[in-house]
Amino acid sequence: MRNRLLLTALALVLPLGQVFANAEKVDYQAVVDQAYAQFKDVDEGANADYIPILATVPSDMFGVVIVTRDGKVFSAGEMDYEFSIQSVSKPFTASLVMAQQGPAAVRTKIGVEPTGLPFNSKMALELYDARSVNPLVNAGAIAAVSLVDADSEADRWDQIHGNLNDYAGRELTVLEEVYTSEYEESWSNRAIANLLFNYGRLYSEPEQTLRVYTRQCSTGINTRDLGMMGATLANEGVNPATGKRVLDAAHVPELLAIMATAGFYDESGEWMYSAGLPAKTGVGGGIVAVVPGKFAIATFSPPLNEAGNSIRGMRAIRYIAGELGVGLYGPNAGE
Ligand code: GLN
């Protein structure tokens, strides 16, 4: 009784919510601004050019955003330019397969081991009899597209597109010029699709699957969209802006585990060592990293390193993760 009186008195003086808010007050905007200022003039790497049109995207564009699990947005730099999502789409389509068939299907029909090889490796499929890869390299991502439960090419695309829209919280459009540029040069991915089919590890017709996969990769997003997509994962599968559940909370940990082990291809170990966060990169220059239960960090900057990962983006996210001390296993140094 006395305690209750005391609490009532306290509640009158100090609204409890405010007490907790103050205790946890983090100046996200300041950290985002610092990351932007610190890395905007980094002049290393080069745009991807094996998809010819990506070489024409202005290399100096740079955007950094944090989107919290309750939908607050803290941004610096380029937020509106629409770039192609490329491989950052891969975990989201893996999530659709998990939602439709459960995480066990991803494990048995695609695989969940990091390959330690470049994203477009064909050798990854030749190394082991099981032909097992993971959904974040091209082979596994093309297999994931083929696993979407669809009765036509159009239906397959509609479902994948709808799922990306749900993660972003708005209707996204395909950048048709990127699609054409990539599809016309898709010899390597066509080889992968055919190899998978040969080994019984592609579950729909190869050329149709390749087209849908290429459309998926050519979908346009801006830096803020990417932050919202990551924030949906940080928010246990519910989009913070629309309130729509996109993935069962029970499957989010499996998805984040694949991002942690394979999100940067043959640089995934280096990434976890330095940043300590599950994340995914794409050759369009996007990266999204997830701090489970808290927020997402997304960046856009086209110049890539040898592994195909955005240089300014990696540095900015490492810096933010280090400053905020949010590495999964404790605060990484961020170096
Ligand atoms: N669409 C690209 C490809 O298939 C995606 C690669 C990437 O972003 N790493 O090559």
Image (cartoon, rainbow, N blue to C red):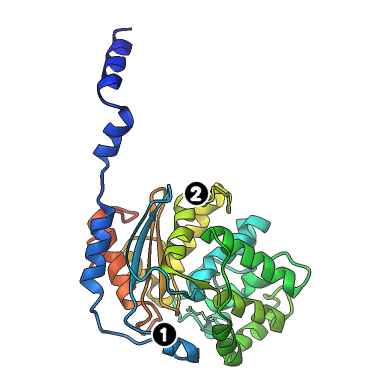
Please, what is the three-letter code of the amino acid marked with disc 1? Val
Residue 196 location (% of width, % of height) = 65, 80
Residue 328 location (% of width, % of height) = 35, 54
Closer to the camera: disc 1 or disc 2?
1
Please, what is the three-letter code of the amino acid marked with disc 2? Glu
| 252, 11: nearer the viewer | 11
| Figure quadrant of the C terminus | bottom left
Mark 1 residue element:
loop
- Pointer 2: residues within 10 angstroms few (<14), some, or many (20+)? many
Q: Place residue 272 in its image quadrant.
A: bottom left
Q: CA distance from mark 1 to mark 2?
A: 33 Å
Identity of the residue drawn at 42% across and 49% down: 69
Taking the image as drawn, is residue 77 in sight? yes
Kindly give the residue lying farthest to the right in the view shown. 151
The correct choice, above or below, for 104 with respect to 152 in the image is above
Q: Place residue 224 in its image quadrant.
A: bottom left
Relative to residue 40, is residue 100 drawn left or right? right
Q: Which numbered disc, 1 or 2, marks the residue that appears first in the sequence?
A: 1
The disc at residue 211 is none
The residue tagged 2 is 236
Identity of the residue drawn at 32% across and 77% down: 311
The residue tagged 1 is 57
Relative to residue 5, is residue 49 drawn left or right? right
| 264, 65: nearer the viewer | 65
The correct choice, above or below, for 41 with respect to 76 in the image is below
Kindly give the residue lying farthest to the top in the view shown. 1
Identity of the residue drawn at 55% across and 52% down: 251
Identity of the residue drawn at 58% across and 58% down: 166
| Figure quadrant of the N terminus | top left
The correct choice, above or below, for 96 with respect to 205 in the image is above
